[in-house]
């Protein structure tokens, strides 16, 4: 009787491990919502811990960036390995519960079922045979899910980086909101550049969708060490806030929509990674951007005036700028530390 109880418990535990793994795979690559699976989170955190330890040995940002560039790809490859391992352990318990022999033989049946088609060693019962082929099917399914979604992920990555690269062409390698405004002014686009703001609005909308449904994308680093999607988002939002608060021109509805889309996207991505606006961040490793100072804002206004841009009264503009910036600055700072983004230059 006690042995029967143990076998029932083993079957239940094995079935739980298998179901948990399949659910984690579905949440990662099939479910079009920002649901996080605990198993996947544990895997990525363990890989992250190892890479942070290696990156801490680097003396320069470039050296640390080179190490962290491998984190997301290695984490993604580790995920199916862990899935298959957990499924194998789960089915080992199931085969033992079905009295297919000792744990060593049950593990051989499970491993050969998972990695081939059917068991290397014949199973003795009908139910065990069904489980053997079910495990083989699940193994193929888990690998197929990852492989089929890799092109989707890299397409989203390419679209994201296209905007980041274009922004660098406009605002320079050391991108800042002021440099972007000066470029817009030189090209005559400051007063009417609705297409540009529409493009950035679409970019933010896609960031919100892809970086929560496929969260590992947030950690894929740009091809160039000095670039980052977090930095680009901060520059665009800063530029929109600076124009809205400081530049004396009619209200641009496309700019307003872009700013709103950016604030929503950045805050939702940050909240997905457990950001809370009223909680101090202590568990991330990157460097957050410095908050702009009143003196820096005055220097920025001087640069804009020198370029011939008509500005509003400076003190009122400063107060409105800081109010607008408060809507996204905390989330940007959190994501900058979380993703180890390069240093962000405020205004």
Image (spheres, rainbow, N blue to C red):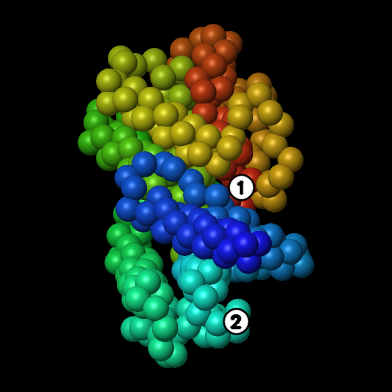
What residue appears at the point 32 percent right and 45 percent down from the top-left corner?
32
Q: Quadrant of residue 297?
A: top right
Q: Secondary structure at mark 2?
A: loop
Residue 59: image x %, image y %?
Answer: 75, 65
Q: Is residue 273 left or right of residue 245?
A: right
Instruction: Look at mark 1 in the image and give the residue it sits on.
Output: 338
What residue appears at the point 52 percent right and 75 percent down from the top-left corner?
99
Residue 125: image x %, image y %?
Answer: 39, 78
Mark 1, Cα crowd under 10 Å, few <14 / some 14-19 / many 20+, is many
Nearer to the camera, 183 or 159: 159
> Could one spot residue 148 in this view of the protein?
yes
Q: Is residue 284 left or right of residue 70?
A: right
Q: Residue furthest left?
A: 195
Q: Earlier in the sequence, mark 1 or mark 2?
A: 2
Nearer to the camera, 299 or 103: 103
What residue appears at the point 37 percent right and 71 percent down from the top-left corner?
127
Instruction: Look at mark 2 in the image and give the residue it sits on.
Output: 102
Q: Secondary structure at mark 1?
A: helix
* On-image quarter of the N terminus: bottom right
Q: Tell me the mark number nearer the camera, choosing from 1 and 2.
A: 2
| 104 vs 151: above or below | below
Q: CA distance from mark 1 to mark 2?
A: 46 Å
Residue 144: image x %, image y %?
Answer: 32, 70
| 207 vs 294: above or below | below
């Amino acid at each position: 009787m006690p042995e029967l109880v143990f076998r029932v418990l083993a079957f239940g535990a094995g079935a739980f491990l298998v179901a948990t793994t399949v659910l984690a795979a579905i949440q990662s690559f099939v479910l079009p919502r920002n649901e996080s699976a605990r198993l996947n989170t544990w895997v990525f955190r363990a890989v992250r811990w190892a890479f942070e330890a290696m990156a801490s040995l680097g003396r320069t940002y470039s050296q640390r960036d080179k190490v962290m560039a491998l984190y997301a790809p290695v984490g993604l490859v580790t995920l199916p390995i862990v899935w298959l391992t957990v499924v194998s352990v789960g089915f080992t318990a199931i085969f033992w519960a079905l009295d297919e022999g000792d744990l060593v033989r049950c593990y051989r049946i499970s491993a050969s079922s998972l990695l081939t088609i059917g068991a290397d060693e014949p199973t003795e019962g009908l139910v065990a045979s069904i489980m053997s082929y079910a495990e083989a099917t699940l193994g193929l399914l888990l690998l197929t899910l990852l492989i089929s979604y890799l092109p989707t992920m890299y397409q989203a990555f390419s679209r994201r980086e296209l905007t980041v690269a274009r922004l660098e062409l406009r605002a320079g390698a050391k991108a800042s909101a002021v440099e972007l405004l000066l470029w817009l002014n030189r090209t005559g686009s400051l007063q009417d550049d609705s297409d540009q703001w529409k493009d950035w609005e679409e970019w933010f909308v896609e960031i919100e969708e892809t970086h929560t449904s496929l969260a590992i994308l947030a950690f894929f680093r740009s091809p160039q060490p000095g670039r980052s999607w977090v930095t680009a988002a901060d520059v665009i939002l800063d530029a929109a806030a600076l124009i809205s608060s400081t530049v004396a021109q009619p209200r641009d509805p496309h700019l307003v929509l872009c700013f709103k889309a950016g604030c929503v996207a950045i805050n939702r991505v940050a909240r997905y990674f457990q950001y809370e606006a009223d909680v101090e961040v202590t568990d991330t490793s990157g460097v957050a951007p410095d908050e702009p100072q009143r003196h820096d804002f005055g220097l920025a206004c001087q640069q804009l005036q020198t370029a011939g841009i008509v500005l509003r009264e400076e003190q009122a503009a400063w107060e409105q700028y800081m109010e607008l910036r408060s809507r996204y600055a905390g989330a940007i700072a959190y994501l900058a530390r979380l993703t180890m983004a390069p240093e962000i230059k405020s205004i």
